[in-house]
Image (spheres, rainbow, N blue to C red):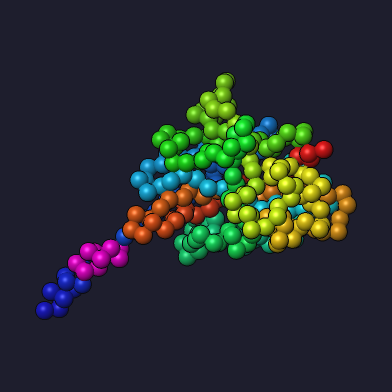
Amino acid sequence: MRKLLVIIVCLLLTTCGIFEYYYLPQVPEASVEESDQYGAIIYLGQMAFSYATGYIIFYRIYVSSEDVSGRINTPELRSQISSSLASDYNFFVRFIDPADTASILRQNTFLDRFFFEVEFRNSSAANVNFLSGSAFSTPKYLYLEFPTSLDRPTARLENDKDPVSHDNNPVYLHRNLQRMLAFSPEPDGDLYFRNRPELNDPANVTTTKNRDVTGQVNTTPRFSYVSLYIAAKGSNPDDFSAIYSKPTHMGIFRLPDAN
């Protein structure tokens, strides 16, 4: 009788889908290579799951009086730039740790820390679904470039690392206008990732204006940095809710001055 009861319970659990778990692999930390020539090169594997919809990049911008160049990858440099940057980085350590299976990335995990999804715009300023799953029928290299000149930071996908010729045209990284429609982000009409007076103006570094910006307020001069995380994204076939892999930190980059 006891054996029969165990069999019945197992059948019920299986048919009710309780054991169903939808998994998306994390981008390995070793796949992220910070580059002196580029901002970063990230190897992104093939989307092998039918419920995967692509990759998503989260960002937050930090204003600082500190002029830091080169790779920003130590606790001392993060704290030097901004205490908020150091705090955010430390908060997400458990989420990016592959060994920590208890810290699960949910839809509002980044949003609750005022991180937003990066948008991508083409040369015509149209919003493009740059990291959709259809682009990853084969593995790709994602190049992020943060110029030191007045140009806008770009992203492009390549089939090979260090290609002789480019496989695709670059797109421009853009702050998330969709999420901030209820606010008044500045500078109006130019939400590319560039350090502008309207971006780092203390009067605009508020939750009602530049909600995606934080850091030192009463400082001169004023530099801007962005911290980026990437995760695979999918849709749960059972209830169509969003599912994510564990995130991976892509790096901290200084934004080019716009003028």
Q: Is 18 colored magenta in this rendering? A: yes
Identify the image quadrant of the N terminus: bottom left
Q: Determine the residue positioned at 50% across, 63% down.
A: 103
Give percent across and percent down for residue 190: 71, 42
Please indicate, yes or no, whether residue 89 appears anywhere in the rendered image: no
Q: Determine the residue positioned at 41% across, 41% down.
A: 47
Chain part drawn in magenta: 11-19
Q: Residue furthest left?
A: 1
Residue 139, located in which quarter of the rendered image? top left
Foreground residue, 178 or 202? 178
Q: Residue furthest top?
A: 164
User: Does 183 sit above or below residue 146?
Assistant: below
User: Does 44 sit above or below residue 76?
Assistant: above
Foreground residue, 125 or 233? 125
Give percent across and percent down for residue 240: 38, 56
Asked whether, in this view, residue 152 is left or right of residue 118, the answer is right
Give percent across and percent down for residue 237: 34, 54
Asked whether, in this view, residue 26 is left or right of residue 172, the answer is left
Q: Is 14 colored magenta in this rendering? A: yes
Give percent across and percent down for residue 186: 74, 50
Please indicate, yes or no, whether residue 206 appears anywhere in the rendered image: yes
Q: Residue furthest bottom?
A: 1
Q: How many marks?
A: 0
Foreground residue, 62 or 118? 118
Q: Determine the residue positioned at 51% across, 50% down.
A: 231
Q: Determine the residue positioned at 16% across, 76% down.
A: 5
Identify the image quadrant of the C terminus: top right
